Amino acid sequence: MSHLLRSLGRLAISNSNRLVPALTALPATSTNQFHTSSTLSKKWNGHSTGPKRWLEYNKIIYPPQEADEKPRPAFVCHQKTNIKYSPKKMWYIASFVRGMSVDEAIKQLSFIDKKGATTVKEAILEAVELAVKRHNVEFRSNLWVAESFCGKGRVFKGFRRHGRGRFGEVEYKHSHYFVRLEEGSPPENYYPGQEQKSGDQMLQEWLESMRKRKVIHSL
């Protein structure tokens, strides 16, 4: 603020010498009238960093395993909070990469022309770096997406002008994205009890259901 006052002082000197005493005699409280940043964003971003429980799973220390016990795969949890994206739109992308290997998920997300796909891709790459540097994962390609989901974040409310002097409410929604990578190869069927069907199988089932259609009360 002192820089702003000095600039105003130089401007006043060039216009009139009589304004210099008035500018130099401004009280200290008058500088609060100048807003150089967004008060709303500073208030929310300074005190709200999003959920913290998901990252606590990275701090769990498990006891040593027995010799005949199945090795426990390493995992890492990561999140991206306060994304300017609707949770309903983010859900499609989060559920799309479940059960994929890391390389396959990154490859598929690179071809999705959506804003949320870029955010999910960045979160997975950050989780891979975290797994290699802090969780002793030897091969970065030996990871798969064990969990991928999103949650509702902050909602800012605004208004939009309509005709005839009326106003409508607008909601600016944010979302949180959570991912957990696990060491090893992905399972054949991510959802238990459901058979993984190919595209040809789903097409044949759809054609069969179309052939079995019947119009009620028809000839």
Image (spheres, grey):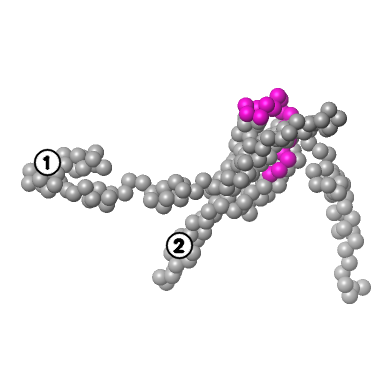
Residue 188 visible in rendering: yes
Secondary element at image label 2: strand
Which segment is the magenta one? Answer: 132-148
Question: Which is more toward the observer, 108 or 18?
Answer: 18
- Write down the residue under mark 2: 159
Q: Which residue is depicted at the point 57% across and 47% down?
A: 51
Q: Is residue 13 left or right of residue 203?
A: left
Q: Is residue 124 visible?
A: no
> Residue 2: where, in percent of width, then height?
23, 40
Mark 1 sits on what residue? 13
Q: Is residue 7 part of the magenta span, yes or no?
A: no
Q: Residue at x 82, y 30 (%)?
A: 66
Residue 33 falls left or right of residue 64: left
Q: What label does residue 3 carry, if any?
A: none
The location of residue 60, given as percent across then percent down, is: 67, 37
For residue 12, above or below residue 127: below
Residue 200 lies left or right of residue 104; in this view the side is right
Residue furthest bottom as drawn: 217
Disc 2 to disc 1, C-alpha distance: 43 Å
Determine whether, in the image, residue 144 is placed left or right of residue 46. right
Please state the horizontal and vertical placement of residue 31, each as a whole percent of the image. 25, 48
The residue under the point 74% across, 29% down is 142
Quarter in which the C terminus is drawn: bottom right
Residue 208 sits in which quadrant?
A: bottom right
**In the image, what residue occupies the spot 7% across and 46% down?**
18
The verdict on residue 147 being magenta is: yes
The amino acid at mark 1 is Ile
Local secondary structure at mark 1? helix
